[in-house]
Amino acid sequence: MSQKTDYQPGEFRWSFLLPQFWGIWIAIIFLMILAILPWAVQHRLAASIGNSAFKYLKSRRKTTLRNLEVCFPEWSEQQLQENARQVFVDQMIGIFETLNAWYSPKWFKNRVTIEGLEHIQNAQAEGKGVLLLGTHSTLLDAGGYLCSQFFEPDVVYRPQNNPLLDMLIVRCRATIYANQIDHDDMRGLIRNLKNGHAIWYSPDQDFGLKQGVMAPFFGTPAATVTAHRRLLKISKAAAVPLYFYRDGDISNPQYHVLIEPALDNFPSEDEFADAVRTNKVIENQLRIAPTQYMWFHRRFKTRPQGYETIY
């Protein structure tokens, strides 16, 4: 009888108990302890770690500053430095928020509001799936948890290279998302859209021009993915912009989910026009809380011949 070699996402393997994985188990226990700390302690730790990361992760700091300089030319040098530093702090706060969503979700009680839920409900009432156009927010899975308080979201994800880490993340996310769809599983994604699901999808990163076109992002040409156009055409789903963010006093934060009306005549027959429109949606979202976005990614890394180098 042959030995089983294929594993389902989230499935436990006895090999995870081997010494090579002990470091990850210890780290997970440590993270679970952090999740039960008072929020005052969590955000102070996040600020301290975020400030240190901004200071010592020079490459990421340089990329963040350059991205903000390109996208917000109206900011002074002081504003650029302060907002870039805050990006790192918000990222660390987002990690604690995600830990709370995974291990201590009651912390969010009475802290969450939503606007525009009817745009999802109306599309689903018409028998349509919903592709939620969002961003790579520093809130991470905490954003998914905010949404799950009002509707059942699916999420597109990239499996982790470490199998134990992937299992743990899949299991934690299972408490938030109705379904987790591998980014390579286009059939599964289309099937769920055709079945009326609402799926969080972020078309906001540079994957080169094999999967997109050059289109302005904050006024600067950027490689912009167009795969969502094909998904929408095949599934007949609605494209609904989704954004979530934190505001208020950091000692007592409030969280907001903003859902905008479905994009009309989208996708059109013009791939470039659709890319411009998608980027404009993302721009408008990011202007609400600029530092709650992963600006340390090289958004403008693809530079075809004739385009100036950004980094």
Image (cartoon, rainbow, N blue to C red):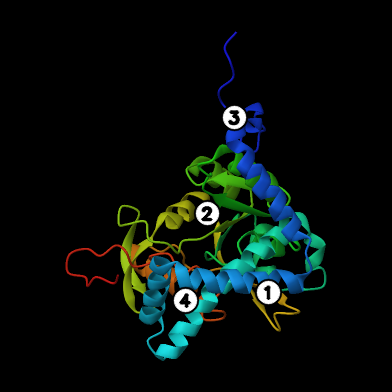
* Residue 241 pos. (x, y %): 56, 68
Crowding near the residue tagged with mark 2, few <14, some 14–19, many ≥20 C-alpha atoms within 10 Å: some
> Going 59% across and 19% down the picture, which residue do you hit?
4
| C-alpha span from label 2 to label 3 | 32 Å
Of the two numbered discs 2 and 4 on the same chain, state the one appearing first in sequence: 2
Residue at (60%, 67%) from the top-left corner?
92
**To which quarter of the image does residue 97 belong?**
bottom right
Q: Observer-nearest residue: 145 or 97?
A: 97
Cα distance in 3D space between marks 4 and 3: 39 Å
Residue 277 on image: x %, y %: 42, 72
Q: Position of residue 283 (x, y in %)?
A: 47, 76
Q: Which residue is mark 4?
A: 283
Tell me the residue that label 1 is attached to: 44
Name, please, the residue furthest toward the top. Answer: 1
Say above or below: 11 vs 240. Answer: above
In this rendering, position of residue 292 left or right of residue 25: left
Amino acid type shown at disc 3: Tyr
Question: SS of the residue at dot 1?
Answer: helix
Point out which mark residue 7 bears.
Answer: 3
